[in-house]
Amino acid sequence: MIILEAESITAGYTEVDILHAVTVRVSSGEIVSVIGPNGAGKSTLLKAVFGILKPRNGTVTLKDEDITGLKPDRVVRKGISYVPQMENVFPSLTIQENLEMGAFIRTDDYGHRIEEMYDLFPLLGERRKQKVGQLSGGQRQMVAMGRALMLDPQLLLLDEPSAGLAPVLVSGIFEKIKEINATGVSMIIVEQNAREALKMASHGYVLAMGRNVLDDTGEALLANEEVGRLYLGG
Amino acid sequence: MLELIVYGIVLGSIISLGAIGLTLVYGIIRFANFAHGDFLTTGAYVALFLVTGLFSWIGIPDNTFGSLSFGWRMVIAFPLAMAVVACVAIALDRILYQKLRQKRSGAVILAMSSLGAAFIVRMIILILWGADSLFYRPGVMRPALELPLGVKIRPDQILILITVIALVGALHLFLQRSKMGKAMRATADNMELALVSGIDTERIIIWTWGIGGALAAAGGILYGIDVQLHPYMGWNFLIPLFAATILGTIGNMYGAFVGGLILGVAQQLSTAWLLPTYKPAVAFVIMIVILFIRPQGIFGGSSS
């Protein structure tokens, strides 16, 4: 079953369009990886889906509901969470408070969800009273994902989760992403680290110059010679 | 000397109330609200209207508590005036600053518009009450209590300190414990991410103005009780307010509190060598020095 369909999205920050009729579909429970060179419009696509950017054209459909152009604070109530690439935590708040802010719109008792996050990221559980500004990049990335997961989203949008992390940490973060996905959360992941991203993806999209270039299963894209040469570094 | 330090702490606690509001607003909306001083004035005059006007008309008894200079009228007027100025601050945001934000005006435009708002507020007070100094209870000098080491302090001043500590303590609990308080800190940290988390940031902005306005009103009333009321009282506080805010790191409520106390003590201590008319200059010099040697303030670390 398809849970999200972004259909021929055209969008940009100014008068200039960055995305030109880009289409992405996510089925329930799958990881979709979006790869492509710098400036291909990968991050812009996530912003358009999440309503940070209003698409000039095209529709975003979540299950059977048209959510095109809804503001982020509405989209998040529909069951989509977003982890920006940069500045994705509240540095002067503690780890615990960051998670609480992720659950801001929840009216039920979400204490058990916080404990689940600490089970997923045991390191965070040990330092729950520590300010996030004092954490390392990898730990911040965990806080950022934890915050986004507090709402039990159906769909998680991850913008370059491995960016800026030391190579030893990258595989750890990808392991966590797989773990999260195994709990039933569908995802769109935008990644520079294309090989790793395609390895975990059931489906992959290649963007270039703001247009769809290729889409196929993750395996097929990994095996594709042209993709290998152009985007996976030979 | 010790006496000047005590008076400085009283003055500083009043400056703190204004500086905390200024720093909270800056933390969220990132602009210097030059109208903040005039919120102090508005609070003081709203309380004056209630105490000497409305309450005598509806017949609330004009008593005083023990050796304090005020009674029930002020106890009722204090929270009411805070609420009124909170509404004034919120209204100013809705009819002026929010419109400018929507048009994506820069911080300079917002600051200039707040300067205009400050003039309007002050002129309204001048029209209604005139340019003379006024008192909540004219003509009564309350005897000072003699503390050890020859420090003389009026009972009013002790109560001012207690009130400020209670207000700052309440704000601390609100920011640390309540959901809305945490969301305010989150929004000050990263407004984009707050929005992405589903926090209604416009509502946070309204709360921030309300709290800032209410604290400023409290500061203005306390200064009126301690010294006098004057249409320019808040404007004259503006330099110490900004100096305290910068000294304590812009956006940091605890820094603003400490900065306010330091400013108050420095201003009062200076009167041991300088004429009291130089007090604003002392604040100005402190602000310039801090901008030169440590522009991020005493609490500005490497976080964020």
Image: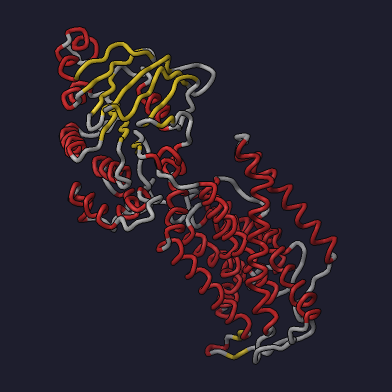
Write down the quadrant of residue A177 in the picture.
top left
x, y (%) of residue B127?
85, 60
Left or right of B192 on screen, residue B66: right
Tell me, yes or no, if residue A164 can be seen here: no
Tell me if residue A162 comes above or below residue B276 in the rendering.
above
Q: How many marks?
A: 0
- Quarter occupied by the N terminus of chain B: bottom right
Tell me if residue B254 comes above or below residue B304 in the rendering.
below
Tell me, yes or no, if residue A234 can be seen here: yes
Left or right of B86 on screen, residue A23: left
Q: Going 16% across and 24% down the picture, which residue do you hit?
A: A199
x, y (%) of residue B278?
69, 63
Write down the quadrant of residue A79 in the picture.
top left
Q: Going 16% across and 14% down the picture, which residue do you hit?
A: A220
Q: Going 45% across and 40% down the picture, which residue do you hit?
A: A74
x, y (%) of residue B248?
49, 57
Tell me if residue B89 comes above or below residue B106 in the rendering.
below
Tell me if residue A101 comes above or below residue B99 in the rendering.
below
Left or right of A172 on screen, residue A89: right
